[in-house]
Amino acid sequence: MQKELLASIKAKTQDLLAAPSCSKEAKAAAETWLAALGSGNEKAATAAYAAVLRELIMPVDGLLAFASSPKAAEIFGKEGAAAFLKHAQELKAQGAAYCDCPACTAVKAILDLVE
């Protein structure tokens, strides 16, 4: 794998790890991928990493479903959930495919680099 591409993926992986919205599954996948760097197994590790990230990125329709759920109201409060739902609806109206939280943004950037 090209050094520049690897460096870009690594930088976006650091963004993912720093994101407050990074799930434990995404964190584990990122750490596993980082541990594989320099092992000569980067290509296979990157493919496995991308496969996990594809499963974890939140589609905008999933975001809408969550934002309108009782769980969102429980987490964010009634007003917070309403604002979150409005944001999700705006994303959908703008044609966004995925959530725009820091973790999903980093995941999308990583997937764009590897695919």
Image (cartoon, grey):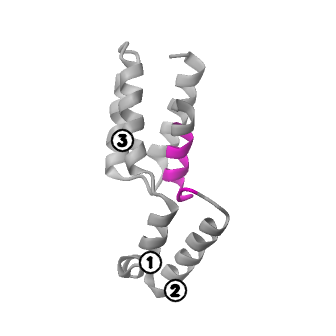
- Examine the rendered structure and indicate whether residue 52 appears above or below residue 76: above
Measured along the vertical axis of the image, is residue 68 above or below residue 19?
A: below
Viewer-nearest residue: 110 or 36:
110
Amino acid at the residue labelled 1: Phe
> Which quadrant of the view contains residue 3?
top right
- Residue furthest to the top: 40
Task: Tell how many labels.
Answer: 3
Secondary structure type for disc 1: helix
Position of residue 112 in the picture relative to residue 75 (left or right): right
Q: Earlier in the sequence, mark 3 or mark 2?
A: 3
Mark 2–mark 1 contact, CB under 8 Å?
A: yes
* Residue under label 1: 76
Q: Amino acid at mark 2?
A: Glu
* Magenta residue span: 97-110
At 41% from the left and 82% from the top, the residue drawn is 73
Rendered residue at 42%/36% (across/down):
50
Residue 38 place in picture, x, y as percent:
40, 15
In three-dimensional space, the C-alpha distance between marks 3 and 2, rounded to whole angstroms, equals 33 Å
